[in-house]
Amino acid sequence: MTEAERDIIRQKILHEIERLKPEIERLKEITKPVPPDDAIGRISRMDNIVNNSVNKAALSKAASRLAGLEYALGQTGHPDFGTCVECGTTIPTARLLAMPESAMCVACAE
């Protein structure tokens, strides 16, 4: 992998991190529990519980992706960045641009 490709991937990672941080904060805010004394009605409360569950799943996924991106950012300077941890082949740059946190090639990830 060339240094120019590493720089492009590094910029992609930084862009994704900056995009995810406010989204995580927004999800944290909307997943706060509704106090039981708030009069929002039984149906609305049930709807809120369902929505809260969906939003918590999205928050978990976003936080996990952020951690993976931050780890990948730290790895971009290592000579083995972009090498599959399973088989040792080079991970295509297109895959790393689509999923910068990928540690495996497509074949090993399947």
Image (cartoon, rainbow, N blue to C red):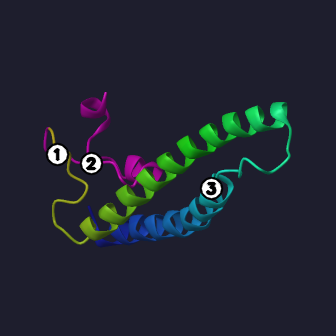
User: Residues in magenta?
Assistant: 87-110
Is residue 94 found left or right of 89 in the rendered image?
right
- As drawn, is 15 to the left or to the right of 23? left
Q: CA distance from mark 2 to mark 3?
A: 27 Å
At label 1, which amino acid type do we have? Val
Name the quarter where the N terminus is drawn: bottom left
Q: Mark 2 — residue?
A: 103
* Amino acid type indicated by mark 3: Leu
Q: Do callouts 2 and 3 mark residues in contact (Cβ within 8 Å)?
A: no
Residue 85 marker: 1
Mark 1 nearby-residue class (10 Å; few <14, some 14–19, many ≥20): some
Q: Residue at x 39, y 55 (%)?
A: 100
Q: Position of residue 84 (x, y in %)?
A: 20, 45
Is disc 3 placed on a helix, strand or loop? helix
Residues under numbered marks 3 and 1 in contact, where contact means CB atoms less than 8 Å apart: no
Q: Earlier in the sequence, mark 2 or mark 3?
A: 3
Q: Amino acid at mark 2?
A: Ala
State if disc 2 and disc 1 touch (CB < 8 Å): yes
Magenta-drawn stretch contains 91:
yes
Q: Which element is circle 2 on?
A: loop
Q: Which residue is mark 3?
A: 27
Q: Is residue 107 left or right of residue 62?
A: left
In three-dimensional space, the C-alpha distance between marks 3 and 1, rounded to whole angstroms, equals 32 Å
